Amino acid sequence: MREVSSSYTVSLHYDRRLYRQDIAGSIAHAGMLAKQGIIAEEEAGEIIDGLAEIKAEIEEEKFQWRPELEDIHMNIENRLYEKIGDVAGKLHTARSRNDQVALDVRMFTKDAITEVVSALHDLRRSLVEKADANADVVMPGYTHVQRAQPVLFAHHMLAYFEMFGRDIERFRQAYDRADVMPLGSGALAGLPYPLDREFVARELGFSRISTNSMDAVSDRDFLLDYQSASAICIMHLSRMGEELVYWSSDEFGFIRLSEEYTTGSSIMPQKRNPDFAEIARGKTGRVYGHLIGLLTTLKGLPLTYNRDMQEDKEGFFDTHDTLLDTLNAFSGMVSGMSLNPDRMREAAQGSYVLATDIADYLVAKGMPFREAHGVVARLSDFAIEEGKSFHEIALDRYKKFSELFESDVLEISVDSSIAARDVPGGTSFSQVKRALADARAALEAENGQ
Amino acid sequence: MREVSSSYTVSLHYDRRLYRQDIAGSIAHAGMLAKQGIIAEEEAGEIIDGLAEIKAEIEEEKFQWRPELEDIHMNIENRLYEKIGDVAGKLHTARSRNDQVALDVRMFTKDAITEVVSALHDLRRSLVEKADANADVVMPGYTHVQRAQPVLFAHHMLAYFEMFGRDIERFRQAYDRADVMPLGSGALAGLPYPLDREFVARELGFSRISTNSMDAVSDRDFLLDYQSASAICIMHLSRMGEELVYWSSDEFGFIRLSEEYTTGSSIMPQKRNPDFAEIARGKTGRVYGHLIGLLTTLKGLPLTYNRDMQEDKEGFFDTHDTLLDTLNAFSGMVSGMSLNPDRMREAAQGSYVLATDIADYLVAKGMPFREAHGVVARLSDFAIEEGKSFHEIALDRYKKFSELFESDVLEISVDSSIAARDVPGGTSFSQVKRALADARAALEAENGQ
Amino acid sequence: MREVSSSYTVSLHYDRRLYRQDIAGSIAHAGMLAKQGIIAEEEAGEIIDGLAEIKAEIEEEKFQWRPELEDIHMNIENRLYEKIGDVAGKLHTARSRNDQVALDVRMFTKDAITEVVSALHDLRRSLVEKADANADVVMPGYTHVQRAQPVLFAHHMLAYFEMFGRDIERFRQAYDRADVMPLGSGALAGLPYPLDREFVARELGFSRISTNSMDAVSDRDFLLDYQSASAICIMHLSRMGEELVYWSSDEFGFIRLSEEYTTGSSIMPQKRNPDFAEIARGKTGRVYGHLIGLLTTLKGLPLTYNRDMQEDKEGFFDTHDTLLDTLNAFSGMVSGMSLNPDRMREAAQGSYVLATDIADYLVAKGMPFREAHGVVARLSDFAIEEGKSFHEIALDRYKKFSELFESDVLEISVDSSIAARDVPGGTSFSQVKRALADARAALEAENGQ
Amino acid sequence: MREVSSSYTVSLHYDRRLYRQDIAGSIAHAGMLAKQGIIAEEEAGEIIDGLAEIKAEIEEEKFQWRPELEDIHMNIENRLYEKIGDVAGKLHTARSRNDQVALDVRMFTKDAITEVVSALHDLRRSLVEKADANADVVMPGYTHVQRAQPVLFAHHMLAYFEMFGRDIERFRQAYDRADVMPLGSGALAGLPYPLDREFVARELGFSRISTNSMDAVSDRDFLLDYQSASAICIMHLSRMGEELVYWSSDEFGFIRLSEEYTTGSSIMPQKRNPDFAEIARGKTGRVYGHLIGLLTTLKGLPLTYNRDMQEDKEGFFDTHDTLLDTLNAFSGMVSGMSLNPDRMREAAQGSYVLATDIADYLVAKGMPFREAHGVVARLSDFAIEEGKSFHEIALDRYKKFSELFESDVLEISVDSSIAARDVPGGTSFSQVKRALADARAALEAENGQ
């Protein structure tokens, strides 16, 4: 018979990341047991001192990890016995592995979200700074990857600012759902001791305690909240990654990513492969996969704890590391990229993207919308046939299409087109200026939180 | 060359569900155009009357759907031309298909969430009522599908009450993210007209307007929020479905589902296959699939609108129908199921599930936790060998394991075990009574919203 | 209590597609029952005639579908009773719904695969024809969406030819796994009748019978095989869709898709949005979703039949329709697209893509590989600084970088680069010519199958 | 600016597993270069000796891994320079990282499949042995988790034998698709050297060479084939895991898993939590996740190599490790589990599961099928009312339901029911005996391969 590798049930290689949470949780628990008279004050003191020493050992990398003890909890528990003897056993009074694990993972999740929100904040700041520094850069806005209407580059950047703002909101809501203290639920049914659960919650910075012990040990919703927020966030990043990749191509030529986030070719020194943007886009798969993985694991599981749930952590940790690095990579890519404003403006002028503006011009002069569209369609046909841009058509030719055309039709330009879209949320200079001011204010407000 | 079926690009067969939202949106838009002097009051009046008639035609099933017009928007637009002639064209002033679709789907999402929250509320009420009506029923609590500790059936039901409460919260947050009015974003860049977007938002019951036009037409986060909330919700339902299936088996024999939610066998009249619980569990796949489907579709899409995004609706509608029906099926199953309290209590007594209580008894008498565990392990070994339950062991035998045992050890029972877990969130009668009161209060509060 | 919509358990709206398979299966079963003396010949005759009439009714759209009978099987069964009375009941001798459904879905799957393979064949032919017709068109080959080396357009098309060839192989293997006749397995345990299962298999064109009754009614592997083959196939199509979208952009400008597969803008007549390529790319989500959906549904299901498995069909049918249409759309897009060979060649010349060829030139003259790379790196630096292409550098300047350069270095060109890659599988004219011949031969061979 | 962790682009921590494949590939490449006169024999000799030494260093754990070199390829390349100096550079003649990586991963995949097929073979053997050793054990067959008909335990085990047999077939087909030698494709376009690609293929044990260079560096189908075969395989395992979990419960009580694959409770010594079966079932999520992850990564990627594709390996390796361990765990669980045949038979007798047999009895006596069903339904009603099993009903009572009943109706039993299902694939003793013989023969045949 072949052997199952010992790592099959062992989780130490990933759950040791929970050491801070595990120790903090144990300290709070021991303190509460003493306060409630369940164990003696001195016993609690010994336990707490022992745990503090273990934490120091781990952080100074002096701790001897023992995989044969399977997980972080047993490693710490065992070390505590070594240090303080049988008193260590008292720590496990009125606590089960089930509520202990739930506590540790919730604490880690809260910390993880705090990190992600901070990285999202930084990325948003990078976007605003890049937009600010290039406030007058014009580029084509696309639909169907076809040039559609001119927009400000800053407006485009602020579209991402919005997306990442929603991500922050979503992660904060995930934080709230993680912010529930489960200790005191026992294995599943609660515990036969006079516990002060609210005290433990306060000590550990939780805003409330769980209200049903069976749910408390079965619930991994907070991880799904984290994972689905991450999936949506990396979807946003994959869209931006796609744009950075194509904008870096010879064909678009809109941007140049900094060396730090590209790899070159020894033989083609001018070449810069946008590797970070590609890897980031590729990592979308991993994050989606971890979401569907946890959903699959939880599907159809009866209450309460089943060992299947051990699978909740590894994908979560990997999602967290991936997301954090990817956010930081985008902050760096955005900050470091240089634009090619001439190429961008040129692209915005081509392709008869001003056709809509000419139609709107006629509507403004009183022509019904649909009729205006017909006139411009004929005008475009003519222009294409002649191989001319709208600017190169003489006014008297315009008048053959409609008497409403005046000389000011020749003033329709990329800039006038942009200026005209002066509605809240639109790409006009003034709207984008205001939007940038709002964005800076939002960043300030976030900073203050 | 083989033909692509005409339905490939046609969306009418599913997007006609948006007719109410589309018409309401157009009416608000026409009203705003008139208010702002962009079209004449009489024009707006004609448009609005025409749209009202079209709505009536649809609801009276007199509307002639024309698939060759591809979608709901063109069907309504075309009918409006038939009714009021060229004035119909004015409706499309200052509006693009891109912001129109975004508006319709957001409105539908808000309505959908309202329905789902209501169905979740009903299911929560069914759980509380069933728990209330069986407040004294005892059953085994399981870990690893092994009997672990006795719990109240009501406590188990309230664990689901918690889950569905989180679902409501999650859907409400999805509602907030859908509650943003995108009209006025145009194709992608905003519009060159003096629009009053806040007016349109108020008319349509939105709490705010979108703040970046490119984001507004690219964003489908609100659908992902809906889909991931649905995925988590149906995961909860799949867990309950699994329990109902097994509890209905001959082996468990805890419950009997009502005929309405089971199918029989003509030849085995006593047999009741828990078909609804199975189908519900099976439909988890569909809902997960639609979530991953939309995430996949959006992965790597550049801004702004791409036709790929037409794929956003069909899975969403199917998820919505599935979830609503499944929630209602569970409300019905919970309300209609009858319990077999004797069988449940009997199961809670077996399997030495009181061993933990005996250990806690010794701890309460002063024995250290770990030592107590050792004593009970030896006691259990003895009991198994003798083929006796803990109750069948005489006190003097107990005393051979520890002098701390007194006659009250024989009072340890399923009921005393439950009573002892009197910590907030625990399964004791008083805690569950309080939790039920809290649950009823929460339902009242929800009703008032 | 809210009602569950009647469609929750009803499958008629989708499983009526199985009518041909269901009737053919019943006819074969009735014939076998008579052959084995289990029912009388005349009884079988009545049953078979009745079924033939029902089939005609359905195909002439005269059949009255009754949703309250829930599924296709009950609709046909009920109609048979109406037609021939109680003899109809004999058809169900020695058959269960469980093996009947398995049979129908297997037969449908086999038919579905035959259709898909044919559509893949057509697409492969379109690719070869387009490659043939443009055998001398040169374009840049890309890595990282950066121009890397010149290739023949035909070579690029043949890369897709390979992918779709693997798809055919994969679908054929799925066919083999579907090609197992399950009837005779009964509900799960086999049947107490002297059946001739091999006879039924032959009648229905199956190559073999199932060998374990419990597996036969539990197994949906053949659908997963179909779904995963479809997921991989549409992944290929999404890659091609992405390329068609970008090649259609102003920035690339390599191709122009035919009107049939694009949508225009009334106001910008030259504009062609590549809607079919986008929708196809978008539909990747749906196909991935159905795969994960079925995997989820089957996860953790105990043997044998569970009602969850009713969920196996709807996603399968949708995948099938989607895939078939998408394949046909690509056949049409490929056949109908026109190239812009000048633009493509021009792009292949830019960006110093010939640097590698110059290095290989030096290696051929005896310089070690790594040294050659260094020389060309310096040469490229020089060229970029001077703003010159490699062709514009004089030979004596070349010689300053290495004495090995001779006048023939100036002969290095897009065409010489392509010609040099004359290794099996390479992009040289002769290799591609041979590959095209092989491709045509493969198509011929497939046709003959 | 926050830093991106250096591991973001580094793949060394997982791709070092490819060292054997990478070195073997390089040796074959160097040999071919010499054979073709592209490099000198002595140069090839130095390279090959150097690589052999590096392999030894790695296997003796003396190799100094350098993460800053990012991947396995650069680590080996760099070490070769250290060892043999500039000649090392000649190894990279006529090879690109793109075709090198494709080669390594294909070789690893082939090895991985060989291991998985062997583990599947072992599991199949365990099933057959367990079935053989318990050839007369009877248990209930279930539909809807309701007892439906008695079956042999061996028949149930052979259902899994079938599933894992299909898995082997699927993995072998994946092997064939991996078995294509890509070296010689260069970066994407082929190489300008007189390579002998067939020679390299033979050296490395490949059955054929790739036929399109662009496809060869873009293609990861073989990994998707592996991942989808794995997803289907672990779905099978999850079904078996679910059954082992429930069969181990107090309620079913059919089996007892060996200590090796369970964890106990210190305090409840009789308790055995089926942890391995649970973890295995939980790991389904991970394997599904990696499949969807890779599908997502590849969605919409243009040709040819994009850095996104670096994400192809980590999930693949994790799937492989997971699957192999899980298969081995199941082999062990199956071999080590002990049955409770009395409990299983008892369960098979309950619940009126013989009703179908009584109906078939009447049909055999000439009663039409549907009429027989009616009689048995009434008989069952009577039995339930009287609280009797079918055996406890007197013959004269039977006759009141139908005159066709004779005394032999009382001989209908679990055993007669099983014996009667004597159709190929059925559960009768003789059929199962034959199926076991076929299974053993299949195992022999596999062994010989």
Image: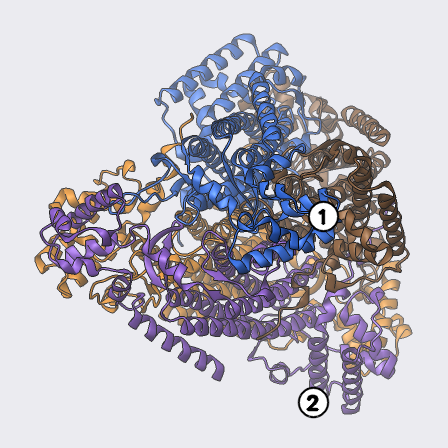
Chain colours: A orange, B purple, C brown, D blue
Residue ID at (76%, 65%): B13
Q: Could you tell me residue B127's position as x and y percent?
A: 46, 70
Label 1 CA crowd tier, 10 Å (few <14, some 14–19, many 20+): many
> At label 1, which amino acid type do we have?
Gly
User: Front-most of B136 and C117?
Assistant: B136
Q: Could you tell me residue C276's position as x and y percent?
A: 76, 53
Same chain? Circles 1 and 2: no
Real-space Cα separation, disc 1 to disc 2, in angstroms: 45 Å
In the picture of the structure, the residue carrying the numbered disc 2 is B35
Q: Is residue B172 left or right of residue C341?
A: left
Residue ID at (75%, 56%): C74
> At label 2, which amino acid type do we have?
Lys
Q: Could you tell me residue C73's position as x and y percent?
A: 75, 53
- Label 2, secondary structure: give it: helix
Q: Is residue D59 left or right of residue C137?
A: left
Q: Is residue D275 left or right of residue C82?
A: left
For residue C241, the mark is: 1
